[in-house]
Amino acid sequence: MKKLVSSLLAATTLAVTAMIASQAGVAQAPAGAPAGATGLCNDGSYWTGATKSGACRGHKGVKTWYAAGGSAAAPAAAPAAPAAPAAAPAAPAAAAPAAKTKTMASTTPAAGGGPGMVWLNTSTKVYHCYGTKYYGTTKAGAYMTEAAAKAKGAHPDAGKPCS
């Protein structure tokens, strides 16, 4: 009996320690963040990728990381899986679909647009100029004038305005 209680106490201590370690340095996403946001970039845009590696490239770096699955927290989260199977899979499952929608571009531009119009990627608040790689090809977006995109709080791709 004494051995059983000792084993249960050790397992509980290990589970609690792993849970605390996995949450160390991970902030809670704010209420205004888009669904699946895993980080906040220094320029105010959100990152929805699954890993911290390469996050916010072109957006002046990572300001705050929300996901527990980042490069620093991933090893600490692994021991928690046997002790708390319901808690560990929740974060990677939510982040995995978001990684697919971050920068995937189709090869065919959306109908519409043309000279004088920009393509606003509505999920990242970045607009792309006519003739550039992502013009009309990101998964979520709309054509509009550059002035309208700026009015919606968007910024130009790579910091270079079209006009």
Image: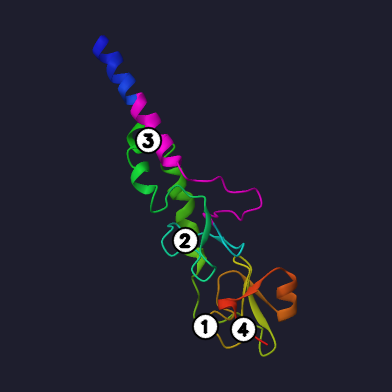
Q: Secondary structure at mark 2?
A: helix
| Left or right of 40 in this view: 116 | right
On the question of residue 55 being in view, the answer is yes
The numbered mark, 2 or 1, whose residue comes first in the sequence reads 2
Decide which of tag 2 and tag 3 comes sooner along the chain: 3
Magenta segment boundaries in residue numbering: 12-39
Say which quadrant the N terminus sits in. top left
What amino acid type is highlighted by mark number 2? Ala
Give the CA separation, mark 2 to mark 4: 24 Å
Task: Residue 99: give its label.
Answer: 2
Instruction: Estimate the x, y position of residue 114 in percent, counting from the top left.
Output: 66, 88
The image quarter in which residue 143 lies: bottom right
Cα separation, mark 4 vs mark 1, equals: 9 Å
Work out whether mark 2 precedes mark 4 in sequence or the reverse, and give the earlier one. Answer: 2
Amino acid of disc 1: Lys
What is the number of the mark on residue 129? 4
| Residue bearing mark 3 | 18
